[in-house]
Amino acid sequence: MDRYIAREFGGIFGICLTALVMIWLLMDLADKIGDFSESKEMLKTIFRFYITRSPAVLLLLLPYSLLLALLYSLGKLSANREFIAMIQSGRSVMRITMPLIFAGVFLALITLGLNYHWAPIAEGSVNDILAEAEGKPKTDADNVLFRNPENRRLWQIGSFPDDYEKGKSLEDVEVTTTRADRTLESRLSAKRASWNRENREWSFEEPLVSHFSPDEPPVFTNHAAPLVIKDWSETPWQLIKPGLEAKYLGIPDLTSWLNGSSKVTQFADSAPYLTQWHYRIALPLSCVVTVLLATPLGIHFSRRGAGGGVFMAVVLSGLMLLVTTISLAIGEADLIRPIYAAWLPNLGFALLGLYLFRRRITGQPIYLILKRLLPGND
């Protein structure tokens, strides 16, 4: 019986996932075909773009495929009176749906693996592929600010080119140094700046250095040769962190960012990064929550209960997505603790799913919940 239920669900889940991927692919391709047409090797660019993005696409569509497969397979088994026959054979509703719960846990593990690193990185790298197709330089971050309070230096970097960690120069760099009383001491502007890993030296090309003294006009100095500075502790890896968007970082990168910000107070707020770190772990739970919401609502023992259960499942799943989005935005704004922003929506809807399961197990009609909410049904 377990194999039969798993086979029924698995076949429908594969169809739903394939259909959603194809629909998403056609819609996204129609939206980006103009960008792809600027590439000299259009088909190769399209193939590379969607292969790179595939982990993020799977992460996006897995919960929806799970919901549709649950509602269809459970509705089919209920309409054929197979659930009634299974219950009459001596199995409880919880025992009958156990293969579906295991499927939700299995998909949650897959989601955890995708969300750990590959999906966020994939979603963040697609812009580089489009830039390369259009003949534009690839950048890892733009308009980055970094503050070193210990040495009272503020860095402003126009762009971090691709492979900056391999020695490529940073573009449009400006470094402002202040005194202890917060007055300007100097400002260094350069078209490009590079960092030597071996010597740990900064080299600034076409530099313009401004020196500021109290009650005196600033003194500007141009250097024909590159200006080399040996005693600055900043590295490109430190400078780029405030410019990296939290939603495009996996757990290893987020952990590195948070560890670095604990040692040096940086210009960027840590709340979005901490919220996304917790969300990377909390998101997979949504697969299990989807099972808890859809399973009791997808099972019906009368013709009247079919449409209402499907409607409630879709509404609750959409509401869970909306609440999660709002909660993450509040957490990233540092209005509530990031751990609460990431976990409370899933935990709240999980409790609701367990309540619906309890009503289904005890034989109480679930549609009565909606009936009580309507006016005039007190």
Image: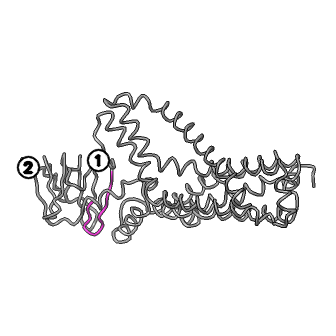
Is residue 152 rendered magenta in the image? yes
Residue lying farthest bottom? Answer: 263
Q: Which is more toward the observer, 146 or 81?
A: 81
Q: Earlier in the sequence, mark 2 or mark 1?
A: 1
The secondary structure that dominates the magenta segment is strand
Query: On the rendered structure, is 341 left or right of 241?
Result: right
Q: Secondary structure at mark 2?
A: loop
Give amino acid for label 2.
His
Query: On the rendered structure, is 200 left or right of 308?
Result: left
Residue that mark 2 sits on? 223
Badge 1: how crowded within 10 Å, few (<14), some, or many (20+)?
A: many
Residue that mark 1 sits on? 159
* Quadrant housing residue 33: top left
Residue 169 pos. (x, y %): 20, 50
Residue 207 pos. (x, y %): 14, 49
* Quadrant housing residue 350: bottom right
Badge 2: how crowded within 10 Å, few (<14), some, or many (20+)?
A: few
Residue occupying the point 31% across, 56% down: 240
Give amino acid for label 1.
Ser
Q: Secondary structure at mark 1?
A: strand
- Nearer the camera: disc 2 or disc 1: 1
Q: Which is more toward the observer, 102 or 24?
A: 102
* Quadrant housing residue 130: top left
Is residue 274 rendered magenta in the image? no
Q: Is residue 56 above or below residue 183?
A: above
- In the rendered structure, which segment of residues is drawn in magenta? 144-153
Q: Which is more toward the observer, 300 or 330?
A: 300
Quadrant in which the N terminus appears: bottom right
Residue 31 pos. (x, y %): 49, 32
Residue occupying the point 35% across, 28% down: 38
Q: Which is more toward the observer, 155 or 304?
A: 304
